[in-house]
C-alpha cells in the first residue's frame, strides 16, 4: 500500500505524474498562446508567437516543431501555425486553467505580478484542485456579499508572513 502522506520535492511530484502529462510547462505556454491568438485570427506566425512570449524566433520555431511532432498543430517552414483539433482542445483547457487561477488570485486580493503568480501556479496544479478553485470562483461570483466580507476581513487581519 502506498503511503499517501509521503513527501517529495517539487520535481519528485512532477515525476510522479510525468506519465500522464507529456507536455512540459514551456510546451503548455506555447500552446496556450497559440490558442489565445487563434481565437481572433485563426492562426499565428512564428514571429508573432515569439514576440508574444518574449523569446527568439529560433526558439519559437523549435518548440513549434516539437508541438507539430506531437500532432497538436500544423506548421510549415516560414508559414502559418494552425492548431489541430487535439491542439485546440488542449489549448482551450490551458487557457481556461489560466483564467480560473487568475480569477481566484484576483478574488483573494493578489495585485502584484498577477500574471507571474498565475503562471507559476498553473503548471503545478492538479485537476482536482483546479476544479475546487473553479467551484470556489463560482461561489464567490454568486455570493458577492461573501467576497466583500472576505475583503474586509483581509484588510483587518492581514499579516506579514515574511516575518514569521
Image (cartoon, rainbow, N blue to C red):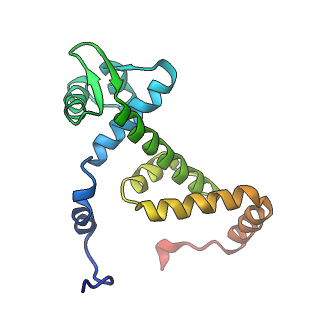
| Residue shown at 22% from the left, 25% from the top | 61
- Identify whether 106 is placed above or below 63: below
- Taking depth in this image into account, of 124 and 118 the one nearest to the observer is 124
Q: Which residue is at a point 22% across and 36% down the rendered structure image? A: 70
Q: Nearer the viewer, residue 45 or 85?
A: 85
Picture layout, residue 70 above or below residue 115: above
Does residue 95 appear in the picture of this structure?
yes
Residue 101 picture location, percent across and down:
52, 53
State left or right for residue 156 relative to residue 8: right
Residue 89 image-quadrant placement = top left
Residue 121 percent coordinates (x, y): 42, 56
Give how far across and how far down residue 128 sits, in percent: 45, 64
Residue that lies at the very extreme toward the top in this rendered image? 78
In this view, 89 is above or below 9: above
Q: Residue at x 24, y 13 (%)?
A: 78
The answer to whether residue 154 is left or right of residue 114 is: right
Q: Is residue 108 visible?
A: no
Measured as percent of width and height from the top left, residue 35 is found at 42, 32
The answer to whether residue 90 is above or below residue 61 is: below
Q: Which residue in the rendered view is the most extreme toward the front?
A: 85
124 lies left or right of 74: right
Where on the picture, by quarter, is residue 4? Answer: bottom left
Residue at screen point 21% across, 63% down:
15
Amino acid at each position: 500500500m502506498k503511503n499517501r502522506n509521503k513527501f517529495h520535492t517539487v520535481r519528485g511530484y512532477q515525476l510522479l505524474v510525468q506519465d500522464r502529462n507529456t507536455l512540459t510547462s514551456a510546451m503548455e505556454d506555447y500552446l496556450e498562446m497559440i490558442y489565445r491568438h487563434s481565437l481572433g485570427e485563426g492562426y499565428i506566425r512564428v514571429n508573432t508567437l515569439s514576440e508574444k512570449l518574449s523569446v527568439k524566433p529560433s526558439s519559437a520555431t523549435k518548440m513549434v516543431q516539437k508541438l507539430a511532432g506531437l500532432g497538436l498543430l500544423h506548421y510549415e517552414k516560414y508559414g502559418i501555425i494552425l492548431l489541430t483539433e487535439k491542439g485546440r482542445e488542449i489549448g482551450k483547457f490551458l487557457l481556461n486553467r489560466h483564467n480560473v487561477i487568475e480569477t481566484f488570485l484576483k478574488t483573494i486580493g493578489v495585485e502584484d505580478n498577477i500574471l507571474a503568480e498565475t503562471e507559476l501556479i498553473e503548471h503545478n496544479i492538479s485537476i482536482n484542485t483546479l476544479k475546487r478553485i473553479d467551484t470556489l470562483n463560482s461561489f464567490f461570483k454568486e455570493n458577492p456579499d461573501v467576497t466583500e466580507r472576505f475583503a474586509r476581513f483581509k484588510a483587518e487581519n492581514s499579516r506579514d508572513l515574511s516575518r514569521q
